[in-house]
Image (spheres, grey):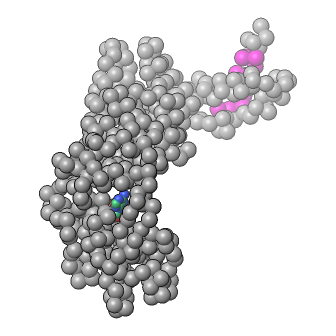
Amino acid sequence: DDEMAKQSENVLIRLNEEGFKAYWVGGCVRDELMGRSVDDMDITTSASPEQVMNIFEDCIPTGLQHGTVTVRSGGHFFEVTTFRTESEYKDNRRPAAVQFVQDIKEDLQRRDFTMNALAMDVNGAIVDPFGGQTDLSQGLIRCVGQAVERFGEDALRMMRCVRFASVFDFSIAFNTWKGLVHQRELLQHIAMERVRTEMVKMMAGPHPRKGLALLYRSQALEHVKAPVEASRFNHRMLTGLEQLSGEHTLLRWSCLLLAGGYDPIEADKLLRQWTFSNEQRARITGVLQVEQQVTDFVKQCEDMPALRAHWIVTVLTCGAQAANDWLQLQQVLPKRWREVSEQVYGSMTLIQTQAAAWIQSMPVHKLKELQMTGEQVLKLVDRKGGPWLGQLMKHLLKETAIGNIKNQRDALSAEVKRVTANEQA
Ligand code: ATP
Ligand code: MG
C-alpha cells in the first residue's frame, strides 16, 4: 500500500543521508514492475548491521548472522539486509556462511532468478545486471548463473522455480529446466514444511494445473521427503481445479487428492507428512470422507427417500461443512468422471441437485440439539450406561435428522422405549 511504500522510502532516504547505498530489492521490485500488489518490501544496503542499528532507533536484530535487521518505520516493518554474498552451502540448503560486500551487483548475484535479482533506488533507477527486466517482459524464469550449480546450492529453488512459473504463467528457460531435471533428487534434503509452503502458494494461484504439469514432467515430487507418485493422478479430474476460487484453496487440495485416488486415511497421512495443520487436514479430508460415503451408498439406493436418508447420515458423520465443500467440488468435476452405470449417474445427479435442500431440511445436526440427553435416556429405561447408549443416541439423532421422529421429548421417549423393548424381546 501507499503508506508502506512511503515508510520504506523514508528508510532508504535515512540510509542515503548517512552516506550508505540503499535499494528496494528482490520480489518487491519484480512485483512492482509486473504491476502486482506488493506485500513486503525488502531493503538492501551497504551499511553493516551495526550501522543500521545505530541509525534506526526502532529495530530488531532478526538475523544478524545473515546481516538482517528489521527496522520499524511508522507502523511498518522492513527487513534491511547488508549487501552480502553466500558461500559453502550445506547439504543443498541455506548457506553456511555469508560475507558482507560493498557492491550491490555481488548481492544480486546470490539471488535465485534474474527477475528476483533486481534492485531499485529511491529515485526509481533499476539495477539489473542479469537481464531480469527482459526476462520478466518475456515471461521467462531463468537462474542467475549456471542452473545446475544454483539448484545444487539450494534445492528449494527448484520448487520456487515451478511455483513462479505456475503463479505468473511464465515459461522456464531451457537451461534452467534442464538444471532442474538434473538436480531434482536433491529435493530430498529440503524440509517438507518449506516444500509445502511453495506448493500452497502454487495451488492458491491462478494456474495450479500448470505447476502440477511441470511437477509431473520433472518428476520433482517423487524426490521430496514425503514423495508423491505423479502417475496416480487422474488429469481429467483436475480440469476443474482452477474453477474453484483461489480463496478456498483447501478445496483445491481436496480435489487434488481425490484425483490422486487417495482415501481419507491415506490423504490424512500424506497431509501430516506434508506438515499441514490439524485444521487444514480436517477440512481437506472431510471432503474425501463424504466422497467415500456417497460412492458407497449411491450404488445401493433405489429411490429418493433412501438417497436422502443416506445423505443425511453422511452429513451427520462428516459434518455440514464437509458436505457443502463436497457439493461445491462436484460442480467443477467433469461429468461422469466416475464412469459408472446410468443408475449411479442418475442418483449422483439427484444428490447434487437436492443435497443442499436436504441439509436445510434437517431439524438437528448434533447430539446437543436433541431434546433428550443420554442421562435422560438412562433414567427412562433404568439401565446402566454402556456402548448401547451411544448407539441409541446416534439412532435417535439419525431418525430425528431424517424426520422420522419429531425432536420432542414424548416422541423421543417413545422411540427409546420401542427400541429397548425390541432389544429385550
Ligand atoms: P514471494 O514473496 O512473492 O513469495 P519472493 O521472490 O519475494 O517471492 P521471498 O522469499 O520474499 O520471495 O524472497 C525475497 C528475495 O530473496 C527473492 O526475490 C530473491 O531475490 C531472494 N531469495 C529468496 N529465496 C531465495 C533462494 N532460495 N535462493 C536465492 N535467492 C532467494
Ligand atoms: Mg517476498
Task: Please tell me which residue is depicted at 45% across the width and 88% down the height of the picture.
Answer: 55
Q: Which residues are magenta?
A: 406-420
Q: At 31% across and 70% down in the image, what residue appears?
A: 107
Residue 417 part of the magenta segment: yes
In this view, the residue in front, 118 or 151, is 151
Q: Quadrant of residue 5?
A: bottom left
- Image quarter for residue 93? bottom left
Q: Is residue 71 left or right of residue 12?
A: right
At a point 38% along the width and 20% down the height, the residue shown is 347
Relative to residue 111, is residue 78 depicted above or below? below
Q: Where residue 118 sits in the image (x, y, percent)?
A: 25, 69
- Asked if residue 418 lies left or right of residue 298, the reply is right
- The reply to whether residue 286 is visible in this rendering is no
Determine whether 421 is above or below 82 in the image.
above
* Above-or-below relation of 283 to 126: above
> Which picture quadrant has residue 398?
top right
Of residues 344 and 215, the one drawn nearer to the viewer in this rendering: 215
Pick the quarter of the image with the N terminus.
bottom left
Ligand 1, by image quadrant, is bottom left
- How far from the left and from the top, in percent, is residue 238? 30, 35
Residue 295 lies within the magenta run = no
Q: Main secondary structure of the magenta part?
A: helix
Please report the residue visible at 37 percent of the width from the left and 23 percent of the height from the top. Answer: 348
Q: Is residue 190 visible?
A: yes
Q: Quadrant of the C terminus?
A: top right
Task: Decide which of 134, 301 is in the foreground and name it.
Answer: 134
